[in-house]
Amino acid sequence: FFFITLLAGTTLSISSSSWFGAWLGLELNLLSFIPLITTKLCPYLAEAAIKYFLIQALASTVLIMSASTFLYAQSVSHVMILLSLLLKLGAAPFHFWFPQVTEGLSWPQAFILLTIQKLAPMFLISYLTFSGNLMSIIMISALLSSLVGALGGLNVMKLRKLMAFSSINHMSWMLVGIYMGDIYWLTYFTFYSLVSGSVIMLLFTTHSSTVSNL
């Protein structure tokens, strides 16, 4: 049931014609994902759920406040909306929560976080009217994401954390794809999801959690 409402929230965000509708969809998505990751009484899952909820709630608050000032200060509003969506995605420099949350999840839950949960914010970023300021922020975030993803994954022994840093690295290419056109980032996202899904399925079936298990 919660997985269906999660997909419904994503669909509502993507298809909405207003920022309020998009925000509503993101909230439905968030409130559906939390029960999905708290299915077991496990301290790691509980910690991951709390961290995820707090970060997403903060980003949602910034998003709705920015959208409400859209008519008065459009350029500032656009920048704040973009920053809140980058925080939701876990793109650098707002990546600090992403590896920690991913590490506390099971493999199927991690797959949802690494793929489906990125869809709505990515679409919303692509809907923004790109000015010079927004393009600069996106390119800086893309550059930082590629560096963080590449360097952060060094000497990491836990596979979930490694997948999280890999996802941050892929985020950089998707952000560049948004600048080039929707078809580019959507194609990249599709292949990224298929490859990530295959790797996660393999790791899930072999019960691997650290590099030494491989």
Image (tube, rainbow, N blue to C red):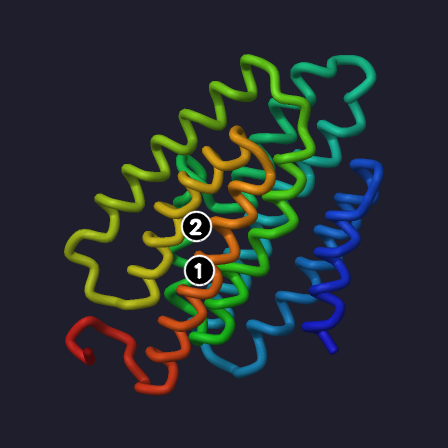
Residue corresponding to mark 2 = 97
Q: Residue at x 59, y 43 (%)?
A: 122
Residue corresponding to mark 1 = 101
Q: What's under tag 2, amino acid-wise?
A: Trp
Q: Vertically, is 26 above or below 128?
A: below
Q: Residue at x 63, y 66 (%)?
A: 33
Element at label 2: loop
Q: Quadrant of the C terminus?
A: bottom left
Q: Vertically, is 7 above or below 133?
A: below
Q: Are marks 2 and 1 in contact (CB under 8 Å)?
A: yes
Q: Nearer the viewer, residue 158 or 51?
A: 158
Q: Residue 129 falls in which quadrant of the image?
A: top right
Q: Nearer the viewer, residue 206 or 60?
A: 206
Q: Nearer the viewer, residue 88 or 182?
A: 182
Is residue 187 toward the left or the right of residue 95 in the image? Answer: right
Rendered location of residue 153, percent (x, y): 24, 52
